[in-house]
């Protein structure tokens, strides 16, 4: 592998904005927000990335029949095509 061409791959905590559930994984994403995460070695500080939808709130994984619409796409569809 060539040196200095790959992005920084580091531990990051992702948090669902709807449910508040958080999980630790590795990613190349960065954030100015941080969170204390408790590990077997003790508490550590990791970057925090807040996401709109994760498996904790996605209708496919939760079994809910609801529409997740953050950009108004459903209303735009109904205005364009009506309630058929």
Image (cartoon, rainbow, N blue to C red):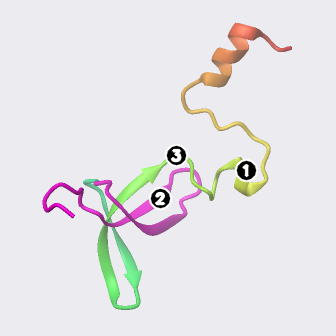
* Circles 3 and 2 in contact, beta carbons < 8 Å: no
Tell me if 50 is positioned left or right of 7 in this view. right
Q: Which residues are magenta?
A: 1-30
Residue 71 drawn above or below residue 27: above
Among all residues in the image, which is located at the extreme front? 1
Find residue 59 and report its horizontal and vertical position in percent. Answer: 72, 48
* Residue 52 part of the magenta segment: no
Q: Which mark, by number, is residue 52?
A: 3
Q: CA distance from mark 3 to mark 1?
A: 15 Å
Label 3 vs 1, first from the N-terminus? 3
Place residue 12 in its image quadrant. Answer: bottom left
Place residue 35 in its image quadrant. Answer: bottom left
Residue that badge 2 annotates: 15
Residue 72 drawn above or below residue 35: above
* Circles 1 and 2 in contact, beta carbons < 8 Å: no
The secondary structure type at the circle numbered 2 is strand
Find residue 36 and report its horizontal and vertical position in percent. Answer: 34, 73
Tell me if 30 is positioned left or right of 38 in this view. left
* Circles 3 and 1 in contact, beta carbons < 8 Å: no
Residue that badge 1 annotates: 60
């Amino acid at each position: 592998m060539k040196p200095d061409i790959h992005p920084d791959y580091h531990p990051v905590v992702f948090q669902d904005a709807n449910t508040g559930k958080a999980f630790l994984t590795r990613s190349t994403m960065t954030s100015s927000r941080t969170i204390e995460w408790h590990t077997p070695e003790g508490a550590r500080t990791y970057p925090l990335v807040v996401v709109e939808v994760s498996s904790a709130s996605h209708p496919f994984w939760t079994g809910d029949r609801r529409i997740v619409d953050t950009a108004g796409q459903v209303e735009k569809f109904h205005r364009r095509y009506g309630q058929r």
